[in-house]
Amino acid sequence: MTDEILSNNEETGLISLLKQVKALKDLSEDELRILIPVLKKISCKADEIIIQEGKVTTSAYIVADGEFSFEKMGRKVKTIYKGDFFGEIAFFDSRSRTGTVRANTSSTLFSMSQEDLENESVISPKITLKIYKGFSRQITSFMREGTALFNNMDVLLIQDGGCAPGYNSVTAFISEYLEKSGRIVFIASEGFRSVVSNRTEDYNCLIYDRNFFNQIDHIAGVYFSPVLRESSGANFRSERYPEFIDPAIQKTAARNIISRKVKVIVGIGGNGTFAGIKALSTLLPENVQVFFIPVTIDSDISGTECIGEFTGIEFGAEKIRCYMADARTHNRCYIIEMMGAQGGFHALHSCLGAGAHLAVLPSSEFDINEVVELVGPRNNTVIAVAEGYKNKERKKEKYTGNAADYFRDELLAAGLQTKQKIVCEGFSRDIRGANPNNMDLMLAQQMSRKLCKMVLNNETLAMPAVRSGKEYSISFDDIRTDNSVESSLASLANRLAKYDPCRE
C-alpha cells in the first residue's frame, strides 16, 4: 500500500463518499470537511492484503473505488464495494482481526486511525463523539439482531468428546442440507459446556448460502459453514465434560434449550456424547426432535460405520509402517499404544493394514509364555496395544505407565530375553487432527443427508447409520457402544502365531 496526499480538487468527491457511510450520517457537511485532514488516501494493488486475520491493528477504512474481499480461514465470504466501511470495531476492541481483507482489483481506500480521530488539535471532541456514537449505533444494532437470532434457534448441534477427523465436515454438510430444506442451523461453541452456560456468545449460527451470509454476517456469531467441509479438527466442540453426568446440570441444559425455543437437537461425537444426548432427551418436551451422529476414530458406536474411522486407520497404519521400517533397520521391538478403549477397533485395523506382528486388544487373552517364546528369537517386531488393554488391572495395581508399558512388563516378567531393543511408544494424538480422507467425507455426506430426511419426516431419538453404502437408522434404544470386534480379525492380526490363519 502507498499513502498519497489528497489534492484540493478531490475534496468534493470525498465529501460525497463520506455521506454514504452510515456511521457518519450524523455529521454535517462542514463537520465532514473537518474530518478530511485525518484521512489517509491509500492506493492498493490487486491481491494486496489490507487487514490480516489474527493480527492486531487499529485502523478503519472507507472504500473509494475498486473491490475487496473479506476472507475467513482462507475462504472468501463477502465482497466489499465503493462506499463500504470496514474495520471500525478496532476502535473499540484491540483484539486480533477476525478476518482478512484483500484487494480484488487495483483500488483506493481512505483510512483513519484511533490516534488521529482523537487528536483534539485537529478534530473537536464534539465531532469525535458523534463519530463514536455512529460506530456504537452500528455495533449495537449488530448485537440486537444477534440476541433476537439466538433466542429462537431452530436446529442446534452439540459436539463433545475427543476430537476426530470429520467433525468439521459433517457440520458443514448438515448445515448445507438442512438450510436447503428451509431450516437454520446453530451450534454450541463448546459442546455441553456452552448449553449449560447459555450466554449468547456460547452459540454460533451456521450459514451455508453466501448471499444469505452476506446479509447477516454483521451479527456476531454468524459463521460461513462451507469453510469447514475439508478442514481438520473440530472448531466447535469441548473436551470431555464429565460434570454433565450430574442430573442437576442436565436439567439446567434442558431448561436453556427450551428457553431458546430449539426444535431439533443433534449430538455429534462418540459414546460419551451419545450418553449425554440420550440423558438430555429424557428432559425435553416430545416436540423437540433429538438425533445423534457418530464421529469417532475408534468406531465405538456399533451397527454403523463411524465418521473418522477410515482416516484414523489410514494414519494409524502409516505410523505403524514407519515403526516397522525402523524396527527392521535397527533390530528393535516396538510396542505401540494405540486408540481403543473398549473393543480396540482402531488398534486392530491399523495393525492389519500395516501388517504388524500382533494386535493386543482389551479383550485379548494370550498365553504370555507363548508370546515370549515367539518374540525372543526375532530380530524385529512391532506390536500394537489398544489403550484399554487390562485397564481394570492397571487401575487396581495403580500402574502409572500406559498400556504398551504394561504389556512390555508382562513380557519381561514372563522371562523375555531378546537381542532386540525394546521401545514403548505412547498413544499418538496427532491422528485426531488429521484432514478427513475421501471415505470419511463421503460418509459425512451420507449421514447428513439421512439426518435431513429424518428431521423432515418428524422422526426422533434415532441415529443415521451407514453400512456398506446403505443408509438406514438406528433408534436410541438399539444403539450399542461396546465397540466389539470380530474374533476372526483379531486372530488374523497375530502374525507371530505358528498356526495357519486360513484354518480358522
Image: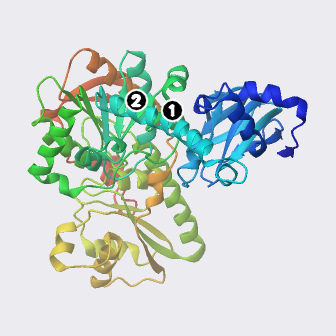
Q: Residue 318: x percent and y percent?
A: 53, 55
Q: Which of the pair 442/32 is nearer the observer?
A: 32
Residue 492 appears left or right of 314? left
Residue 223 appears left or right of 156? right
Q: Secondary structure at mark 1?
A: loop
Dividing the picture into quadrants, the one containing residue 145 is top left
Residue 334 appears left or right of 44? left
User: In the figure, 476 relative to 419: above or below?
Assistant: above
Q: Residue 364: x percent and y percent?
A: 24, 61
Task: Using the numbered discs, state the Cα–Cα distance from disc 1 to disc 2 in whole angstroms.
Answer: 9 Å
Q: Residue 239: x percent and y percent?
A: 33, 55
Q: Which mark is residue 218?
A: 1
Quadrant of the drawing holding the N terminus: top right
| Coloring basis for residues | rainbow
Q: Crowding at label 2, few (<14), some or many (≥20) Cα neighbours within 10 Å?
A: some
Say what amino acid the circle numbered 1 marks: His
Q: Could you tell me which residue is drawn at 69 percent across and 47 percent down?
A: 123
Q: Earlier in the sequence, mark 1 or mark 2?
A: 2
Q: Which of the pair 160/334 is nearer the observer?
A: 160
Q: Which mark is residue 245?
A: none
User: In the figure, 270 relative to 227: above or below?
Assistant: below
Q: Which of the pair 225/26 is nearer the observer?
A: 26
Q: Could you tell me which residue is drawn at 61 percent across and 36 percent down?
A: 75
Q: Which of the pair 103/350 is nearer the observer?
A: 103
Can the viewer see residue 468?
A: no
Say what amino acid the circle numbered 2 marks: Glu
Dividing the picture into quadrants, the one containing residue 377 is bottom left
User: In the figure, 31 relative to 123: above or below?
Assistant: above
Q: Crowding at label 1, few (<14), some or many (≥20) Cα neighbours within 10 Å?
A: some
Q: Secondary structure at mark 2?
A: helix
Q: Which residue is mark 2?
A: 145
